[in-house]
């Protein structure tokens, strides 16, 4: 969960995390830093879940066919 590339990717597209991180660095307020880290950790966990879901192998599609 301390994957810096994943953090950079997330910050590039998540406005609230980006704002909170910048604000925390500027304010040097431990409460805001803690909030920024917590929000980012939650979001990164959600990102990982979504990526794992998208990476999962397709189910029951013999010969690449999609049965409906
Ligand atoms: Zn975020």
Image: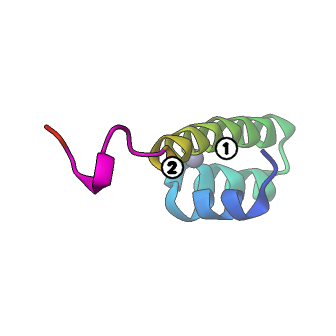
Secondary structure of the residue carrying numbered label 1 = helix
Classify residue 40 by image quadrant: top right
Horizontal arrangement in the rendering, residue 52 relative to residue 4 (left or right): left
Specify the segment rendered in magenta: 57-66
- Specify the label residue 13 is tagged with: none
The residue labelled by disc 2 is: 55
* Vertical arrangement, residue 23 with respect to residue 34, above or below: below
The percent position of residue 43, horizontal first and vertical second, equals 59, 41
From mark 1 to mark 2, how far is it between C-alphas?
Answer: 22 Å
Secondary structure of the residue carrying numbered label 2 = helix
The percent position of residue 26, horizontal first and vertical second, equals 77, 59
* 38, 46: nearer the viewer: 46
Q: Could you tell me what secondary structure mostly forms the magenta stretch?
A: loop
Outermost residue toward the left? 68
Residue at point 75%, 41% (across, down) = 37
The percent position of residue 17, horizontal first and vertical second, equals 60, 50
Does the stretch in magenta take in 62?
Answer: yes
Does the stretch in magenta take in 68?
Answer: no
Nearest-to-viewer mark from 1 and 2: 2
The residue labelled by disc 1 is: 40
Residue at point 64%, 44% (across, down) = 44
């Amino acid at each position: 969960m301390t994957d810096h590339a994943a953090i950079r990717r997330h910050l590039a597209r998540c406005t609230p995390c980006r704002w909170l991180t910048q604000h925390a660095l500027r304010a040097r307020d431990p409460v805001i830093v803690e909030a920024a880290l917590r929000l980012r950790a939650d979001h990164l966990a959600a990102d990982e879940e979504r990526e794992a879901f998208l990476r999962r192998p397709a189910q029951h599609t013999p010969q690449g066919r999609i049965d409906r």
